[in-house]
Amino acid sequence: MDVELALIAERLKIQLPYLRADKNDKRMAHDFLERFVAQGKKCFQKRTDKDYVAYSDAIEAFDKADRLLVSWANRASHSFDVVRPEAVKLIETCEKALDFFECSSCGKRVWFADAEGSESVQCQCGQIRWRYGRA
Ligand SMILES: [Zn+2]
């Protein structure tokens, strides 16, 4: 999960707070999700009839996954009472959130290689796109 999030962040050129290599491995999923939410509001867009608009469903899903992750992590660090169904729910919520990076129309991810531009990335058909943030 953390590895996948790190790869996504790299493709979307998301700037992260710690750039020192030795810290990269320890960065938690929360750090990534937090940024997907914050930057996604400006960067992640979906095409409508006329124009691109903020992909609010996706942002909501990232936010929901992030909040669940934080509350789970807080409790898990204090005791071992995290029950399996709860962990399963967390993973499902996170996976569901990440599914938003895949276009429901063409099935490609938003960072589809051939469509990469200097300002943004998009899926093959252009229904979803991510404009690089200007941090
Ligand atoms: Zn598409």
Image (spheres, helix red, strand yellow):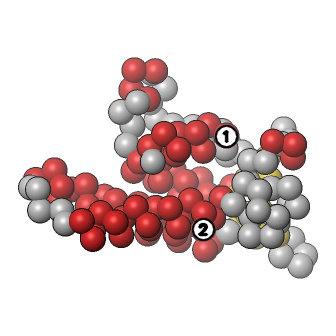
Location of residue 17 with respect to 30 vertically, above or below: above
Q: Can the viewer see residue 3?
A: yes
Image quadrant assignment for residue 20: top left
Dot 2: what SS? helix
Q: Which residue is mark 1?
A: 11
Dot 1: what SS? helix
Amino acid, disc 2: Ala
Q: Are marks 1 and 2 in contact (CB under 8 Å)?
A: no
- Residue at screen point 81% across, 42% down: 113
Amino acid, disc 1: Arg
* Separation of residues labelled 1 and 2 (CA atoms): 17 Å
Of the numbered discs in the image, which one, if any, rests on residue 25? none
Q: What percent of the width, then of the height, locates residue 51?
A: 86, 71
Q: Residue furthest left?
A: 79
Q: In the displayed structure, does residue 38 sit left or right of residue 81?
A: right
Location of residue 41 with respect to 9 vertically, above or below: below
Q: Residues within 10 Å of mark 2 (few under 14, many from 20)?
A: many
Q: Can the viewer see residue 71?
A: no
Q: What percent of the width, then of the height, locates residue 128?
A: 77, 62
Q: Which residue is mark 2?
A: 58
